[in-house]
Amino acid sequence: MFGATKDLQRTRHEHEHHRVTFIELFFDLVFVFAITQLSHSLLKHLTPMGALETGLLFLAVWWVWIFTCWITNWMDPEQPVVRLLMLALMLAGLLMTTSLPEAFEDKGMLFACAFVAMQVGRSLFMLWALRRHNERNYRNFLRITAWLTVSGAFWIAGGLSEGAMRLALWGVAVAIEFSSPSLGFWTPGLGRSTTADWDVEGAHMAERCALFVIIALGETLLVTGATFAELPMSVGVVTAFGASFVASVAMWWIYFDAAAERASTHFARSDDPGRIARLAYTYIHLPLIAGVVVSAVGDELALAHPDGHVDVKSAVVLLAGPALYLFGDLLFRRVTTQRFPRSHLAGLIGLAVLAPLATGLTPALLSVATSTLLVAVAASESLSRRREARSAVSAP
């Protein structure tokens, strides 16, 4: 059935971008579950070590998703064989996701095997699909496969180990995977790739990453709604619930009111879309998505004990979520639109000012304070965009 490959690459037309297909959206459902698993794991292990382990797993989850995003940017998901690849990746992703809460316990090997199967298996598929149709990208995937094979050995070795050794080996694996794109996947005998080699359809990748932001924000609403439904009604609970919802809306507004569309337009028109895809979407979206995940944990803490004492751990989580999000969006705007949003910097300063005051507030009030700062940033950005629009209309 698949003995001879035809060209499975997307057909591109000038001034058009590929819509996100239903199979891509179906694939993303696994990562809705993954985000939920990660936020619950962090909530259950709210210690420095728990945060480190959850952070490492978060990096792995993001990495396997963004690599698949690159693949569907090149390959046509409507082709049956590409669709079968996506479904196989879905199955492996579901196995990986189910193992997340116990990845540093009894299910480390399951996590490692599922992750490596996705990373290496997908790259081997690309070698098969590209070998007669795109020599430059075929060589690129020879390099990628070599790097993923090396990192895969550390993932598997970590799965076979325990405790601190597992964390160390998986840390090396993450370092290898995350450094490889910035090093051009340099491989002996094959040299290195350049961003010009990565022929990216910018609008499609921008839309895919925007949808992942929606997935993460949806998870915060899921956590908030599920927790609120199980709690007795009180002023503190309602206050924390309202603040959590407002924060989610503000985060959506900050990213989607203008930044996502402007970034997509700049991306599509760039002379070097591979550089933007690597920096703004592969790397810089990490703190942005992490901010949403940590905010979801903060929302659950505030809902569970709205009128209690804010301990140091709760204060860190409630402040770190919005801070990570604003920092990530600031970097994203700086790279994709060459703007430095001063509103984001003001928001980060406001969070820093709140930090020494946090333990004197209740969780509900701290949640209200951080939500208010996010709303102020969103409002400032909207007003700034509208002033720019009026100036552009009135300009001769």
Image (tube, grey):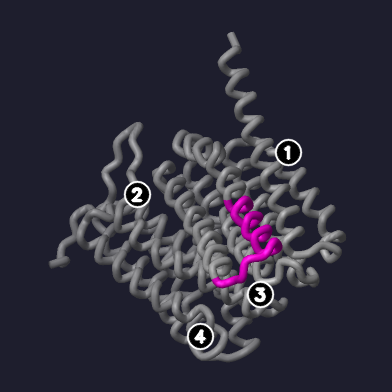
Query: In terms of sequence position, does the residue under pointer 4 or pointer 2 come before the other?
Result: 2
Badge 4 crowding class, 10 Å Cα cut-off, few under 14, some 14 to 19, many 20 or more, is: many
- For image coordinates 33% across by 61% down, the residue present is 26
Report helix, strand or loop for mark 1. helix
- Measure the alpha-carbon separation of dots 4 and 1: 43 Å
Query: In terms of sequence position, does the residue under pointer 3 or pointer 1 come before the other?
Result: 3
What amino acid type is highlighted by mark number 4? Gly
Left or right, residue 8 beside residue 385: left
On the question of residue 155 being in view, the answer is: yes
- Measure the alpha-carbon separation of dots 3 and 1: 31 Å
Numbered badge on residue 108:
4
- Measure the alpha-carbon separation of dots 4 and 2: 33 Å
Q: Are marks 4 and 3 in contact (CB under 8 Å)?
A: no
Query: Which stretch did the figure color magenta?
Result: 230-248
- For image coordinates 38% across by 58% down, the residue present is 139
Q: Which image quarter is the C terminus in? A: top right
Which quadrant of the structure image shows residue 33?
A: bottom left
Report helix, strand or loop for mark 4. helix
Numbered badge on residue 52:
3
The residue at which mark 2 appears reads as 20
Q: Is residue 303 magenta?
A: no
